[in-house]
Image (cartoon, grey):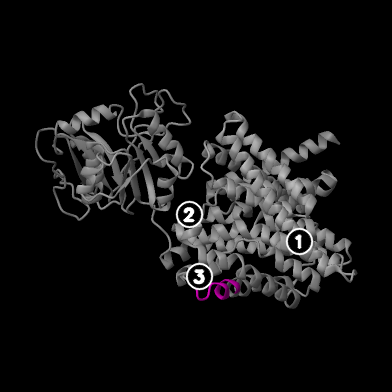
Amino acid sequence: MDSHLSHVLVMVVALGVGAQWLAWRYRVPAIVLLALSGLFAGPVFGWINPSEDIGPLLRPIIGLCVAVILFEGGLSLRFHELREAASGIKRLCSIGAAFAWLVGSLCAYSFGQLSLPVSMVFGAIIVVTGPTVIIPMLRQAGLNRRTASYLKWEGILNDPVGALLAVLMVQYFVFSGDAATSDQVFVTMGWGVLAALALGTSGAWLLGQTFQHNWAPDYLKAPLSLGLVLVVYVVANTVQHEAGLLATTVMGVVMGNMDLPNMESMRRFKEYITILMVSSVFVLLTADLEPEILLHLNWHAVALVVAVLFLVRPMAVLLATSFTDMAWRDRILVSWIAPRGIVAAAVAGVFGPELVDAGYPDGDLLVPLIFSVIFATVLLHGFTITYLARWLGLANDPHGVLIAGASPWSTELARYLNKELGIQVLLVDSSWHRLREARLAGVPVIYGDVLSENVVNSLELTEIGCVLGATSNDAYNSLVCNQFTAQMEGRQVFQLPMYSDDSNGARGTTRALAGIAAFSENAQYEELWRCHFQSWKFFKTRITEGYSYEDFQRDCPTGAMLIGTLREDGSFRFYSRLSPTRPRAGDTVVFYSKSKLMSRGGRRPSHKPVDADGEADAEVPHG
């Protein structure tokens, strides 16, 4: 028995992680592959049956995992984002949730032909909009921060709201035989909410004090917070069934807005744990579906799913956000995008059997109906959010360049990229004096430490496609790269090479902390400073069908340093000898040299390069 259970758990984890990798590799919504993995492993082939294999431990395991997932989601919520979109978020999480519940319940009763109790629980569950699904979608679409904050805050805050609303409905109908049920349920619910708020805030405060006063070593901080999250969840559930979801969410939000040391590393640890839990739980839930129940889904189920997509969500959002400062473009996007995810599935998996036990046989349909909504919303919303966002003008093109560290060389680089090539450049430095030349040249700058929370909060990261750590401190450059690698693809994060380069740009820092070494092996900070004062200049040349990259390499002056490539689509990428890219026809190559392109015989190239405007002889120095 123990051996079989071990095999089942290993298979669940392997299927979940494998589905996540395939989703990343082929750029499809992960939740779709997770659900398919569970369906094939469970109802289709019968390899695993969680209810039998795990038994009564299944529901507690799912509940604990969901608590950690909501805590991790709460850590990503920042109050400065709430201030930017406060009015819309308040409406979405209050009036919008109420409308979604009422309209969803009516649709389930009329279109889905469900009994009133099951319809009310169904309406409560679809209030949940799935942060584990929406956050990857936001990254994929590149939404601006204001629009993204609407969906992110709603997704995380409405998870416990929908779950608690479902708890209220289940308790009411399960105990509906008691004449005093209404008063008892609402009083109990009120105490549960107060207890959840108090426990969540107290847990966050206790962890904050522990971190600020160094009462625990760094290696214990993440495990300690994880353990306390589980304790808060269990204690809150003791006061009120499923109040633990609200308590852990509050705990994450409060803790995420504290100025605590090492929060970034803890967030990353929690993200790793959450991905593993989301993958495993979703495979377990889909594998636990019974084939007989799936066969009971008919055209009523199809009509209900269509109503949720095209009636419930748009009506709830448009009515709730009327007469607010929320832009009409934001309202249109938010009224369509509402993918359901792991919490909706988990809550349905818990309350479906409870309704059946209470004498409502159509409670068996709750889980397959919720999974139908999950599949429909993830597929339709996941594959349309990018196009809709671009059509509405709400998506940012990640073509900007962020340079950390203002030196004479990096200031000239920022000026050249911005003024000569039209690239959006942002130069960040903690010295107002070092930023002076950039300010006078009209280059956008930010005064402050790029690693500070204030600067990070002011950045529109969806507009940044490339980061370069260019300060005189190699370790600081590595920290900059480590900061942004968590939010951008690692291949887009560069730093100046170090003198003791071991082919990965790591000297005195670990390999994981260092970014990609940019330019050539001789492009250290001091060397670039020397070249600048020896009157080296930046030049550009256009690769065409008539002037290939091989021609450019042939004509490039001896000792010239390749800086990067401006693609036809407007994106810019720094050059690195560790991950070289080959420019194609239509790309513009930027290089740093003491002289212009010359042929080997000292003549101008027979095929004159052209710049981005199509003009010949593009290698005119910016100075």
Let me know if residue 286 appears in the view. Answer: no
- Residue 489 vs 245, above or below: the answer is above
- The residue pinned by badge 1 equals 189
Q: Which residue is mark 3?
A: 331
In the image, 340: left or right of 41? left
Quadrant of the image occupied by residue 225:
top right
Where residue 553 sits, quadrant-wise, is top left
* Real-space CA distance between mark 3 and mark 2, rounded to the nearest whole angstrom: 21 Å
Q: Which residue is mark 2?
A: 80
Q: Tell me: 134 left or right of 348.
A: left
Picture coordinates of residue 156 (x, y %)?
A: 60, 56
First to last magenta residue range: 316-324
User: Mark 3 or mark 1, which is nearer the start of the sequence?
Assistant: 1
Q: Image point 51% across, 66% down: which residue?
A: 87
Q: Amino acid at mark 2?
A: His
User: Quick one: quadrant of the C terminus?
Assistant: top left
Question: Residue at horizontal 62%, vertical 67%?
Answer: 94
The secondary element bearing badge 1 is classed as: helix
Q: Are marks 1 and 3 in contact (CB under 8 Å)?
A: no
